[in-house]
């Protein structure tokens, strides 16, 4: 779309929503996983993109980051802003009106909305994998990806096949141990999980996952704020009887290193992976936002980073009781998804759908611009009987007052 047209549409959308932009659902398939069928996508649309592309098991929110899927169209993973019968990419809107959309400081530093969030929903576990560091990803012209998890209770009434996640490596595991697992790749199960430890997943809590840390996410629906990149390296050769191609280990590795086992082992941060207090140093529990709760509403931090780590992303869960309203001020732009109930954010309607057809528009997702968030927005629950629950995630350097991992107790 021509830049001038995007500018006109962006201005129209910003005026119509007073800084709040309606977003269309963004669905993403994964060919190597089995969908868990809890994202409210109609059952007949799980394979709407074709069996060869895989089942749809992810929904991305306020995303300007394309999905790194083989055979994907160029806009897969990208969010669209909808204004009446017109639409444009959120990525293009940010490029056209960056300071207004995400704030001058973030625009000057990144020239994009550098984060995104998503739901992922699978029947069983994901292969034990890690996300590359900034330095490692830069070797193939990409960016690293730290991330965090929150398990929304509204989507996790059932845990599916394996509601546990393997994290890291047992204390004392050596590089030689991991190397032997890679040597056994084509012999079946390479045994990488024998070197790790599983943690039971609890709805209403989450985890912080830095780069270079192995993790095999379990089968709870997961809300995942993260850096705007889709890089990974999978270290497990067989998952629930399904082979994992070697290509998924080296997809973001320089070609000359594809068979260099020592290089692949050295990509892992062994100090972080073998932390004897891994749970204590990575598990997240909700923390009330100071000064942001009152009669009929509560705002809580659900995703945040560890002390000493860069403030790259964070997320809050806001609950408004039936018939109540609250004015919420935030430090910067955010993407929002409705988890339960109905109401309004500013003059924009919010409604949590029961079932969504592929390509259907919904009223459960918005992007709130920097100036609107800082001015304060009225959230109103219009239901007489059900709470309005929303999740909203933020970009870098927005919430220095967020708690740090390990600072809160259950």
Image (spheres, rainbow, N blue to C red):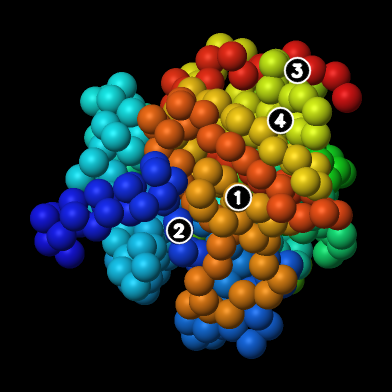
Residue at image location 31% in from the left, 58% down from the top: 89
N-term-proximal mark, 2 vs 3: 2
- Mark 4 residue crowding within 10 angstroms, few (<14) / some (14–19) / many (20+): many
Q: CA distance from mark 1 to mark 2?
A: 15 Å
Q: 10 Å neighbourhood of mark 3: few (<14), some, or many (≥20)?
A: some
Residue 275 sits above or below residue 185 on the image = above
Q: Nearer the viewer, residue 226 or 152?
A: 152
| Circle 1: element type | strand
Residue 23 image label: 2
Q: Relative to 387, is 379 on the left or the right?
A: left
Left or right for 400, reference 324: left
Residue 51 position, x and y percent, is 54, 85
Mark 2 or 4, nearer chain start: 2
Element type at marker 3? Answer: loop
Task: Name the residue beneath numbered marker 1.
Answer: 344
Residue 176 visible in this rendered orientation of the protein: no
Mark 4 sits on what residue?
A: 299
In front: label 3 or label 4: 4
Q: Residue at x 75, y 14 (%)?
A: 407
**Cα–Cα span, label 1 and label 3:** 34 Å
Looking at marks 3 and 4 on the same chain, the residue that comes earlier in the sequence is marked by 4
């Amino acid at each position: 779309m021509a830049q001038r047209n995007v500018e006109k549409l962006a201005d129209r959308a910003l005026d119509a929503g007073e800084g709040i932009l309606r977003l269309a659902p963004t669905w993403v398939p994964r060919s190597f996983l089995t969908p868990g069928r809890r994202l409210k996508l109609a059952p007949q649309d799980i394979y709407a993109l074709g069996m060869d592309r895989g089942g749809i098991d992810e929904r991305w929110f306020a995303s300007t980051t394309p999905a790194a899927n083989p055979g994907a169209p160029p806009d897969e993973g990208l969010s669209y802003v909808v204004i009446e019968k017109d639409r444009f990419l959120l990525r293009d809107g940010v490029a056209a009106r960056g300071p207004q959309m995400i704030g001058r400081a973030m625009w000057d530093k990144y020239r994009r909305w550098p984060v995104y969030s998503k739901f992922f929903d699978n029947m069983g576990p994901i292969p034990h994998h890690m996300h590359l560091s900034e330095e490692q990803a830069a070797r193939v012209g990409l960016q690293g990806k730290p991330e965090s998890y929150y398990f929304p209770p509204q989507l996790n009434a059932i845990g599916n096949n394996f509601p546990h996640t393997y994290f890291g490596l047992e204390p004392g595991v050596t590089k030689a141990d991991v190397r032997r697992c890679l040597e056994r790749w084509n012999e079946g199960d390479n045994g990488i999980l024998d070197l790790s430890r599983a943690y039971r997943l609890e709805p209403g809590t989450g985890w912080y996952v830095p780069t270079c840390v192995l993790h095999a996410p379990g089968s709870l629906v997961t809300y995942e704020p993260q850096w705007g990149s889709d890089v990974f390296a999978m270290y497990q050769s067989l998952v629930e009887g399904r082979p994992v191609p070697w290509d998924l280990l080296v997809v973001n590795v320089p070609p000359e290193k594809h068979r260099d086992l020592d290089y692949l082992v050295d990509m892992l941060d062994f100090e972080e992976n073998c932390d004897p207090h891994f749970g204590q140093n990575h598990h997240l529990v909700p923390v009330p936002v100071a000064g942001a709760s009152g009669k009929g509403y509560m705002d809580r931090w659900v995703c945040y980073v560890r002390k000493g780590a860069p403030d790259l992303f964070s997320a809050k869960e806001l609950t408004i009781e039936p018939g109540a309203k609250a004015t919420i001020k935030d430090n910067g732009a955010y993407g929002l998804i409705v988890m339960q109930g109905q109401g309004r954010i500013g003059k924009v309607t919010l409604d949590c759908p029961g079932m969504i057809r592929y390509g259907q528009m919904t009223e459960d997702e918005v992007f709130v611009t920097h100036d609107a968030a800082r001015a304060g927005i009225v959230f109103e629950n219009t239901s007489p009987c059900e709470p309005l629950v929303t999740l909203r995630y933020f970009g870098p350097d927005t919430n220095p007052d967020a708690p740090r991992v390990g600072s809160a107790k259950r």
